[in-house]
Amino acid sequence: MSLDTNDIATDVRERGPLSAIADTQVLPAQWRVHLGLIASVLVMASPLLLAFVMSTQTVPEVYDITDIGVGSDGLANYAEVFTRYGMASYMFNSLVMSIVVTVAKIAVSLLAAVALVFYDFRFKNAIFFLILFTLMFPVPVRIVPLYEMMAALGWTNTLLALTGPYVASATAVFLLRQHFMSIPDSLVESAKVDGVGPLRFLWKVLIPMSRGMISGLSVITFIYAWNQYLWPLIVVSDQSKQVVQVGMKYLQSVGNAGQTDWGLIMAGAVLTLLPPLLALIVFRGPLLETFGLSE
């Protein structure tokens, strides 16, 4: 970009030499910032780009280190993963599990947060700290007693076993409690004067005022449930009822002549990434609001 000398001279006369020189440096500085951001995005996205390229390649093309372009298989690997290796079934199972966990966890957390903020009862603070204390015992630590419980209830190989351990969430209760504590007391008193009951107050007042927080928590919960691997691997023995993360493990055994078919594996990986990525794109605003950020 060239700058006219007459324009620079005019700026020097009107605003002084320092201001004019500073303006001529704004554009190069902006370009440096944008180039740095683009380079950072490319570096972070390179594994995903590499996975997509490999998902279009045949086995010989994958093992040929000089071949870094789009492969000759095109979308054939995606079709084969869906039809021959049951990825569609695994994704459906994961989708159902994630939706059930998200809805149940948000509902339980809302009720718990309402009780902790708007009701007075004995040992309320102790109960709240006990809820937070459960953060020290994630599901992998509780696998053995949880599995024994599922077996005693006859829930193994069922949706109840997949979703039951994830319904309660100390993190969601804590975030919703802190959010509800910011609601003015005058609003609560007005609702009591108008005879609004607890559930109606939750449905008509708290939920509409907390849509951003609830949406952000829903996205986080959905992605967390979608990425579960260890617990489904243990509690579900029927392959047709498995989730997508375990289904990816089954793809690792696919190959010919001792060579793993990385094209199929990468096609499955790309498909596995799509639902969480779509959720992040659609609900990016509420998700940023949950963390106190803005777009």
Image: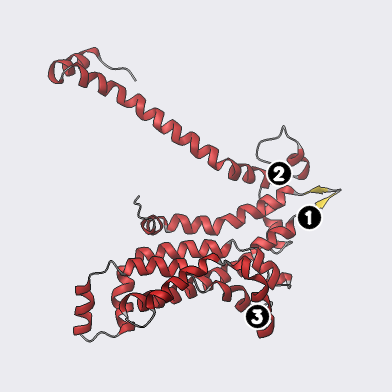
Kindly check if marks 3 and 2 are in contact, taking CB atoms under 8 A apart as contact.
no
As measured in the structure, the alpha-carbon distance from the residue carrying label 2 to the one carrying label 1 is: 15 Å
Q: Is residue 154 above or below residue 174?
A: below
Q: CA distance from mark 3 to mark 2?
A: 45 Å
* Residue 194 % position (x, y): 20, 84
Q: Would you name the residue on which mark 3 appears? A: 149
Q: Is residue 207 left or right of residue 47?
A: left
Q: Nearer the viewer, mark 3 or mark 2?
A: 3
Q: Residue at x 49, y 37 (%)?
A: 40
Work out whether 110 lies above or below 288.
below
Q: Quadrant of residue 44?
A: top right
Across and down, in percent, residue 246 comes to 68, 62
Asked which quadrant contains residue 203, the reply is: bottom left
Q: Nearer the viewer, residue 265 or 152?
A: 152
Name the amino acid, label 2: Gln
Q: Nearer the viewer, mark 1 or mark 3?
A: 3
Please state which amino acid type lies under the numbered disc 3.
Met
Q: Which mark is residue 57?
A: 2
Q: Are marks 1 and 3 in contact (CB under 8 Å)?
A: no
Amino acid, disc 1: Val
Are there few (<14), some (14-19), or many (20+) residues within 10 Å of tag 3? some
Q: What is the CA distance from the residue labelled 1 to the residue labelled 3?
A: 35 Å
- Local SS, label 3: helix
- Residue 97 shown left or right of residue 19 in the figure: right
Q: For the point 35% across and 76% down, which residue is it? A: 114
Q: Nearer the viewer, residue 139 or 128?
A: 128
Residue, x 66% and y 64% (percent of image)?
A: 230
Label 2 neighbourhood size at 10 Å, few (<14), some (14-19), many (20+)? many
**What residue did someone put label 1 on?**
254
Task: Choose the circle earlier in sequence order: 1 or 3.
Answer: 3
